[in-house]
Image (cartoon, helix red, strand yellow):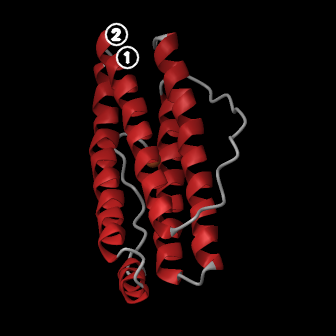
Amino acid sequence: MQNEKMIQAVNDQVNKELFSAYFYLAMQAYFSSLNLDGFANYFRVQVQEERDHALGFFNYLNKIGGKVTFAEIQKPQSEFSSPQEVFELALKHEQFVTQSIYSLMNIAREIQDHTTEIFLQWYITEQAEEEENMGRVLNKLKLIKGDGAGLFMIDSELAQRIYTPAVIPGVII
Ligand SMILES: [Fe+2]
């Protein structure tokens, strides 16, 4: 029988991942409205990844005998002042999600739930990559200081991002 605290924390994480998808969809909409299609593509892929993350936790919760209780998904910020602001917010959000997954890991360790520890390992690695990716684009945006030609170069680069379905050990999404 799984610990109630663990089940609750995994349940809450489903909501956080769905919020992430919603937040990044707002960012996709912002870039689409500016005709920055590469940036919009970057967030389109990000939204799909967040949905995968949510489904990963959702299916894991079912697997360990819990049932997802859905909560309201918070309204995301949808007005942004610049592409740089978007990436500052996205990086900050990923750092928040990383802390949340660390908390899940701490609970798993506290109750010696090794199965959940192994499951969470994928997410820990994924979060490091997410922060790295957001940070890399943010640094480029800082370098170009709003220069139009630089922005179009980054836009072309981000147009190349392709969605690959997540393969999360132990769950089928
Ligand atoms: Fe995520």
Is residue 97 visible in the rendered structure shown here?
yes
Q: Which residue is mark 2?
A: 111
| In the depicted structure, whether residue 69 falls above or below residue 83 | above
Identify the residue at horizontal 52%, vertical 11% (top origin): 4
Q: Could you say where residue 25 lies in the image, as x and y percent from the top left?
A: 61, 61
Please name the amino acid that badge 2 sits on: Ile
In the displayed structure image, the side of residue 157 where residue 56 appears, left or right: right
Q: Are marks 2 and 1 in contact (CB under 8 Å)?
A: yes
Query: In the rendering, which numbered label is found on residue 107?
Result: 1
Residue type, label 1: Ile
Relative to 93, residue 4 above or below: above
Q: CA distance from mark 2 to mark 1?
A: 6 Å
Q: Nearer the viewer, residue 104 or 52?
A: 104
In the image, residue 118 sits, relative to residue 74, either above or below, namely above
Q: Which one is nearer the viewer's eye here, 44 or 85? A: 85
Answer yes or no: disc 1 within 8 Å of ligand 1: no
